Image (spheres, helix red, strand yellow):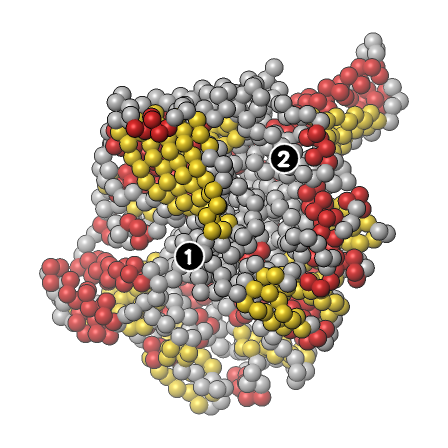
């Protein structure tokens, strides 16, 4: 058992007390470490001004993940090296290629977002395989807002910096990170106030039983907001990421199984391989920084009414495994969501893993995320559709929506009506499409009106059917304007 | 004689910015620093009856809690915690503690009770009070309209918006040896100094305000910020430095914002298709005691040389915080309405919207009767049309459809913005050891004013750019104007020109007939003179010395756009392509061409960046940004960056920027007008006009929502 959190900062091992471990990493950097180059712009993981890099050992190599320090607890840096903007060119002369390109290509105006942008791009510069495409740069920048420049010079700077070969990771970093590794559970603090990171499930269940009111966090990309925005007091924090095996991603012959603490970034490749549209939803899920911290289990367990992954996984027929002590139970994912922000999770129970059946060749999956802006935006509506096609008829249908009700929900009546639908007879579809309207009573809010949501939900189902019926993608989708604008390059 | 074109140069502050070494107000390390958190009112209108601070005082680390009862009583509403609550989120108390965590916990523990009152949340709610201001008229628009062969009339709406610069509002106050020093991001250091002195009954001479680097402002940081005197008083009472960084939601509720505005525009054209009459009635959302004028008649009369103009404007007073200026405060909403209406008229006349505008070259300001100092709008339109490929545009709507059903539309609109100038008081010191220090008014908030000053100085004098200190944003260095309304470059341009001339004269006197080699530092060293220092003051056209007194006092000192002999405006033309997705009606803006007439361009690199940023602002305004009021409770609904959606990188396509770069012959010696504001003006209308061209649907309110196009 270890009684402090440890990470590497500027060549030294830092040990944090329980109180420090529960601060946000941003506050720790600015207030305790006097590293004020990292900025606070929103305190909710939207603007990216606080982006820092966590370097960690993963599967035997060092990875550099950009994270939002404003909603990450300092304790979550345990086992990592924390790199900030000041560390890239420590002599004070600009020598990091990203900083150099940002300087020469005028990627900075007021400069407040610049440290975060530099760190996002530095992570990419270090880890991204070459060549780095414009689209990859745009994806990397999705979580960084700039209010001055109009972004273009920043994209150019990133492309120029990443045109050079991928640099070697300093050998000392891997050595230091390996040396820091241990198998200990962490309990920093006392009964009244602590930061705990159990190593085994049994230890986790003990903690949950003893401290039922503790705040349980995985990536903290949502729970972090409760601390920074709702300003809740959370003296007892249990962090799940060190629980052995809970982050395991496994593929059997029939299913993809994702441990609850696997990050969205780590699960992205396997999940995305199930269906191209799921890969696209994940590309637009939060931002690079959010995906590096957020977990698949957390996204499910928090039961957001939108939650992007949930409707997709419901349509794919995923099941959820819950555990409390030795007792486990499995239920269809859709049954987990009971009502707005209310889940079928019993006291002391955790979401252990989620299992997604591998789609067979007759299965057709479509998912569409509708937002106001292209990136980093909460969906107004997310529609996910999985159809088994037999000949030219729908043999089974699973239709799920986010943003249409207080929970991610299936359209069960519509699913029934779709059975036997003739893909070659579009004129017979409208009554079936209309049936959706009776199944949902969406809200009007600033993201979209109820009427718009209903109409778009219907159109998305229509679009999915058209595509499955064989309509060319060029008639149902447009290339992103980023691609269009740079098609000639 | 106007200056020749300026070369492209690197920003002089970019190096520190990419290194993370630039210190903003909240980054300044101070020994013994205390942290503060504000307690916002939880009622939209009423009176504070009690504030219980005991709970907060019991939190370990809390040092003091300030409430309205700690502040000097003043006639009128003080900018401090008050017992009268005028809007939800108004400060009720300030908790000061040894740590930020304790300050937050303490703020949560403060309990206030209120006697609530009925409130008016929206401009169309019952109880909203309409208050007309002086109309703006020229000629006889009524007669001209009556005689018009073709008329159109329509109403347009611009929403409430918040600036959301990336830097949060913050104040750090230090009280030491009877002197108050305030570090904060502001566009108006001298104004802050004057108003803090008034609020706290201090002699302005003991107050200094330092705002060396501002992380974006866009108008939000023009007025005295609500928290500043509160934090200052806390520092004075406790005797230790105090820092407050407002959470973003509190900024939404206490900073100024762009008020919602409504615009009724009628245009008349004669039988020859010439625009002859303009009637334009505007009103905007206003607080009960706010002073932001509904000044929407700045740009429309100065665009197209129409002699007959009839404009009215009004406040609509409701229960909200004070609105304020946000980037292009009047011309952006006004030109959205006016340039949409011009497009509607051109359409009704069957005219190409570029050709229609080109036929209306303005030379005179109908309001003052004076000539315009310069107007190269037609050059902007011609060059923009060429670069955009406008000649390939079909005149009919919905005529450009991609194979996938995407509707493509091309739109144009123009903008104008007053050319303003502030008086300046500046000090230039050149030293034999190679250093140069120039102290003048200005605040660096991203626009690149330090780079502009360096650019101008290096043209005038052979000084060493590596050892050049530009002291701005500091009341201790020079009286600070409000850096806004695109007056920065023009104002410092005058100061640099004057200071350099005086320095050259002083050098000539010092050196006499001798011929000495080397740059100015070298020459000083040779004659064994440690340094030379000159002080200058400059005035805008037609200003007298009273303007310098106002500048020193932190009062409004700027002039423009109407000067004794002429009126001066900057202009711009925007060409926009929109793409409307067939199944969802999402609107994308893949391509924009913007050509500006800002007179002589002093810093080509920062100028192009200003225009790109301005266009991005217009894309945000046209398609995304609106702060929505919750009419049940007052206050703002989407008070964070997750739900106040500013454009992200993926929203932005190609923005091609060009400049006419012809010097203005009358306004000043450099030949510059202004740029940062005009950059945005008209671009939102160009988007709406392009959407009309794509879909045939005319949307007359911002933001254009997908719902509007279904």
Task: Report x, y in % for residue A474.
Answer: 24, 49
Neighbour tally class for label 2: few under 14, some 14-19, many 20 plus, Cα within 10 Å: many
Q: Is residue B653 above or below residue A26?
A: above
Where, quadrant-wise, is the N terminus of chain B in this rendering?
A: top right
Residue identifier under label 1: B125
Looking at the image, which is closer to me, A143 or B551? B551
Left or right for B5, reference B621: right
Residue A94's image quarter? top right
Q: Residue placed at 49% from the left, 77% from the top?
A: A246
In the image, what residue occupies the spot 37% across and 84% down? Answer: A330
Q: How many labels does the image show?
A: 2
User: Measured from the top left, where is residue B62 in percent x and y?
Assistant: 73, 70
Q: Which residue lies furthest to the top in this view?
A: B513
Disc on the earlier residue, 1 or 2: 1
- In this rendering, the answer to whether B631 lies above or below B686 is below
**Residue at which label 2 appears:** B449
Return the chain for callout 2: B
Q: What element carries label 2?
A: helix
Q: Do labels 1 and 2 share a chain?
A: yes
């Amino acid at each position: 058992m270890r009684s402090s959190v440890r990470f590497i900062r500027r060549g030294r091992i830092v040990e944090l007390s329980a109180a420090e471990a529960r601060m946000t990493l941003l506050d720790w950097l600015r207030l305790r470490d006097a590293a004020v180059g990292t900025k606070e712009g929103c305190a909710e993981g939207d603007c990216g001004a606080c982006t820092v890099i966590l370097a960690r050992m993963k599967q035997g190599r060092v990875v550099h993940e950009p994270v939002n320090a404003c909603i990450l607890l300092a304790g979550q840096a345990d086992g990592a090296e924390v790199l900030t903007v000041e560390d890239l060119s420590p002599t004070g002369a600009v020598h990091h290629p990203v900083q150099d390109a940002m300087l020469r290509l005028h990627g900075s105006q007021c400069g407040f977002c610049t440290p975060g942008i530099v760190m996002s791009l530095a992570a990419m510069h270090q880890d991204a395989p070459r060549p780095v495409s414009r689209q990859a740069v745009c994806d990397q920048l999705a979580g960084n807002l700039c209010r001055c420049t109009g972004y273009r010079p920043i994209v150019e700077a990133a492309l120029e910096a990443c045109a050079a070969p991928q640099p070697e990771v300093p050998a000392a970093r891997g050595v230091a990170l390996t040396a820091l590794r241990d198998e200990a559970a962490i309990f920093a603090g006392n009964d009244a106030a602590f930061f705990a990171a159990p190593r085994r499930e049994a230890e986790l269940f003990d903690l949950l039983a003893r401290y039922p009111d503790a705040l349980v966090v995985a990536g903290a990309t949502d729970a972090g907001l409760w601390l920074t925005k709702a300003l809740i007091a959370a003296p007892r924090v249990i962090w799940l990421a060190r629980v052995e095996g809970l982050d395991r991603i496994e593929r059997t012959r029939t299913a993809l199984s994702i441990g609850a603490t696997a990050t969205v970034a780590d699960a992205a490749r396997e999940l995305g391989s199930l269906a191209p549209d799921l890969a696209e939803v994940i590309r637009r899920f939060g931002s690079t920084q959010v995906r590096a911290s957020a977990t698949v289990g957390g996204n499910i367990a928090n039961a957001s009414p939108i939650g992007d992954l949930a409707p997709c996984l419901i349509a794919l027929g995923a099941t959820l495994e819950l555990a409390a002590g030795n007792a486990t139970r499995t239920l269809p994912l859709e049954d987990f969501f009971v009502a707005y922000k209310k889940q079928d999770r019993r006291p002391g129970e955790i979401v252990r893993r989620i299992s997604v059946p591998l789609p067979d060749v007759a299965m057709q999956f479509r998912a569409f995320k509708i937002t106001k802006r292209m990136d980093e935006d909460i969906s107004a509506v997310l529609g996910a559709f999985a159809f088994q096609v037999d000949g030219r008829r729908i043999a089974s249908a699973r239709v799920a929506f986010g943003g249409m009700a207080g929970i991610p929900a299936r359209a069960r009546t519509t699913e029934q009506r779709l059975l036997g639908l003739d893909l070659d007879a579009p004129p017979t579809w409208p009554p079936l499409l209309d049936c959706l309207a009776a199944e949902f009573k969406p809200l009007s809010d600033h993201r979209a009106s109820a009427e718009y949501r209903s109409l778009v939900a219907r159109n998305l189902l229509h679009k999915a059917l058209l595509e499955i019926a064989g309509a060319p993608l060029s008639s149902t989708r447009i290339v992103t304007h980023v691609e269009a604008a740079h098609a000639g390059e | 004689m106007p200056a020749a074109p300026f070369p492209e140069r690197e920003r002089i502050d970019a190096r520190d910015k990419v290194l993370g070494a630039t210190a903003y107000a909240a980054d300044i390390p101070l020994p013994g620093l205390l942290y503060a958190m504000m307690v916002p009112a939880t009622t939209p209108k009423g009176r504070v009856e009690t504030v219980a601070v005991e709970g907060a005082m019991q939190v370990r680390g809390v040092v003091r809690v300030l409430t309205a009862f700690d502040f000097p009583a003043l006639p009128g509403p003080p900018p401090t915690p008050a017992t009268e609550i005028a809007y939800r989120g108004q400060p009720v108390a300030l908790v000061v503690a040894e740590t930020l965590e304790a300050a937050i916990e303490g703020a949560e523990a403060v309990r206030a009770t209120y006697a609530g009152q009925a409130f008016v949340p929206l401009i169309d709610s019952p109880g909203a009070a309409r208050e007309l201001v002086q109309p703006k008229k020229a000629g006889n628009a009524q007669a001209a309209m009556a005689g018009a062969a073709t008329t159109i009339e329509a109403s347009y709406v611009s929403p409430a918006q918040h600036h959301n610069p990336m830097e949060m509002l913050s104040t750090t106050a230090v009280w030491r040896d009877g002197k108050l020093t305030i570090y904060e991001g502001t566009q108006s250091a001298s104004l802050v100094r004057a108003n803090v002195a008034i609020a706290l009954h201090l002699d302005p001479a003991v107050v200094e305000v330092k705002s060396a680097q501002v992380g974006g402002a866009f108008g939000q940081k023009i007025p005295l910020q609500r928290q500043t005197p509160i934090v200052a008083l806390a520092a004075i009472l406790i005797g230790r430095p105090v820092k407050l960084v407002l959470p973003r939601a509190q900024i939404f509720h206490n900073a100024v914002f762009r008020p919602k505005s409504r615009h009724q525009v009628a245009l008349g054209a004669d039988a020859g298709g010439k625009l002859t009459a303009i009637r334009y009635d505007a009103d905007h959302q206003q607080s009960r005691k706010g002073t932001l004028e509904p000044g929407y008649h700045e740009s429309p009369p100065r665009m197209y040389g129409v002699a007959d103009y009839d404009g009215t404007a009004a406040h609509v007073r409701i229960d909200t915080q004070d609105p304020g200026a946000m980037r292009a405060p009047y011309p952006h909403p006004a030109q959205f309405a006016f340039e949409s209406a011009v497009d509607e008229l051109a359409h009704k006349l069957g005219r190409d919207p570029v050709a229609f505008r080109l036929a209306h070259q303005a030379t005179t300001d109908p309001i003052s009767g004076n000539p315009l100092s310069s107007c190269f709008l037609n050059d902007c339109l011609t060059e923009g049309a060429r670069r955009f490929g406008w000649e390939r545009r079909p005149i009919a709507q919905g005529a450009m459809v991609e194979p996938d059903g995407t509707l493509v539309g091309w739109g144009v609109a123009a903008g104008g913005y007053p050319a303003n100038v502030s008086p300046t008081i500046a000090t230039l010191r050149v030293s034999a050891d190679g250093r140069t220090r120039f102290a003048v008014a200005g605040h660096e908030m991203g626009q690149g004013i330090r780079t502009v000053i360096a650019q101008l100085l290096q043209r005038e004098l052979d000084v060493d750019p590596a050892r050049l200190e530009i002291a701005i944003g500091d009341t201790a260095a020079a009286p600070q104007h409000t850096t806004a309304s695109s007056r920065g470059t023009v104002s410092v341009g005058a100061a640099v020109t004057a200071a350099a001339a005086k320095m050259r004269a002083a050098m000539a006197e010092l050196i006499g007939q001798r011929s000495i080699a080397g740059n100015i530092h070298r020459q000083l060293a040779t004659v064994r003179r440690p340094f030379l220092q000159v002080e200058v003051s400059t005035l805008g056209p037609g200003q007298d010395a009273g303007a310098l007194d106002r500048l020193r006092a932190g009062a409004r000192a700027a002039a423009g756009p109407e000067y004794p002999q002429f009126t001066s405006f900057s202009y711009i033309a925007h060409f926009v392509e929109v793409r409307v997705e067939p199944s969802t009606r999402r609107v994308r803006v893949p391509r924009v061409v913007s050509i500006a007439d800002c007179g002589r361009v002093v810093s080509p690199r920062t100028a192009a960046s200003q225009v790109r940023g301005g266009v991005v602002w217009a894309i945000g305004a046209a398609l995304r940004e609106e702060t929505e009021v919750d009419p049940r409770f007052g206050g703002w609904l989407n008070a964070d960056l997750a739900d106040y959606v500013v454009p992200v990188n993926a929203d932005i396509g190609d923005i091609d920027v060009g400049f006419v770069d012809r010097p203005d012959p009358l306004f000043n010696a450099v030949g510059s007008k202004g740029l940062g504001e005009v950059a945005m003006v008209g671009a939102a209308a160009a988007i709406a006009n392009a959407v009309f061209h794509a879909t045939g649907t005319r949307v007359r309110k911002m933001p254009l929502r997908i719902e509007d196009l279904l």
